[in-house]
Amino acid sequence: MFFFFCVIFFISSPPTRHLYFTSHFSSSISFLSAVVLLDTTTVLGELDWKTFPVNGWDAITEMDEQNRPIHTFQVCHVMEPNQNNWLRSGWIQRQAAQRVYVELRFTLRDCNSIPWVSGTCKETFNLFYLQTDEPLPVRTRFRPSDYAKVDTIAADESFTQTDLGDRVLRLNTEVREVGPVTKKGFYLAFQDVGACIALVSVKVFYKRCPSTLRNLAAFPDTVPHMDSSSLVEVRGACVENAEERDTPKLYCGADGDWLVPLGRCICSIGHEEIDDQCRGEECFSEWLVVGFLSNKLSQCCLKLAHCELNILMKS
């Protein structure tokens, strides 16, 4: 087997190693609106991923400067023809997801930089997935035909022997959409057909519109529709001491963004809008405690015209 390098050495090297990163995204991502189902960079124990055959992909775990494990998988059988090496993740629960996204960070060797491998060396690998309602029994036979292909993954930048000498890591980032997912969970699988790859990290997530307050109405966490071209209409609930003027609505988009605000709530009589809340009589109690003891009025009391604090202070 032709080993190209141990990628961990470069990842954990100090900044003076001049690591170079390249990124390509198939869609715009904001992790503020993402729910992470798997992130191999945060797994403290063993990943327990399976390889078929067992001598195909190699699992390498090293510790970084904070004594946290870094899990990497690599394969480089570029000297031998007809490669078919599979790496399968553990079972991943989908939770509320209808579509999931897989972010891959990896390096890939330029075949032209390896002598005597023309015809056997490849510069791509394949991503697959399998949906199940529960984890497969341990002794289940691995059948590639059970897995659905997501895409063929290629690198924007591959590295050469010169990069190795200069200790440069050309790290690629690719994101692919998987789904629709309808069962309780799924597996990811990676097929090598003769490339020189180091899979540095895998992150699996789905998008949601996070809970928010808009126009004195509260909107809950909402998962976008399976059909990415349609919006989810969500009706808001008025905050305490507020009532509907027009039915408050927001629309949850496929990328986890709230769109098209309609309607609103207004504060009930005797209350005023402050910081997305309706404040009223409680301000007087606050003045008794805070204002009387410290001779200072809170910002709440200063802003409320209906509190009649001027009358109280003059009497």
Image (cartoon, rainbow, N blue to C red):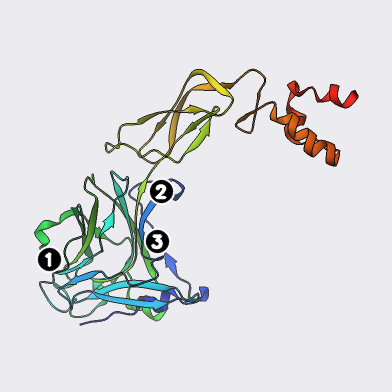
Disc 3: CA contacts within 10 A as few (<14), some (14-19) or many (>=20)? some
Marks 2 & 1, CB-CB < 8 Å contact: no
Is any part of residue 75 visible from this angle?
yes
Q: Secondary structure at mark 3?
A: loop
Q: How many marks?
A: 3
Q: Who comes first in sequence, dot 3 or dot 2?
A: 3
Choose mark 2 or mark 1, whichever is in front.
1
Would residue 215 be found to the left or right of residue 94 on screen?
right
| Quadrant holding the C terminus | top right
Q: Position of residue 241 (x, y in %)?
A: 59, 25
Kindly identify which numbered label has been placed on residue 22.
Answer: 3
Q: Amino acid at mark 2?
A: Ala
Q: Earlier in the sequence, mark 1 or mark 3?
A: 3
Q: Residues within 10 Å of mark 2 (few under 14, many from 20)?
A: some
Q: Could you say which disc has been placed on residue 140 in the image?
A: 1
Q: Residue at x 73, y 26 (%)?
A: 304
Q: Residue at x 75, y 29 (%)?
A: 284
Q: Measured along the vertical axis of the image, is residue 297 above or below residue 66? A: above
Mark 3–mark 2 distance (CA, rounded to whole Å): 22 Å
Quadrant position of residue 302: top right
Asked whether 206 or 90 is in front, the reply is 90
Is label 1 in a helix, a strand or a loop?
loop
Of labels 2 and 1, earlier in sequence is 2
Cα distance in 3D space between marks 2 and 1: 32 Å
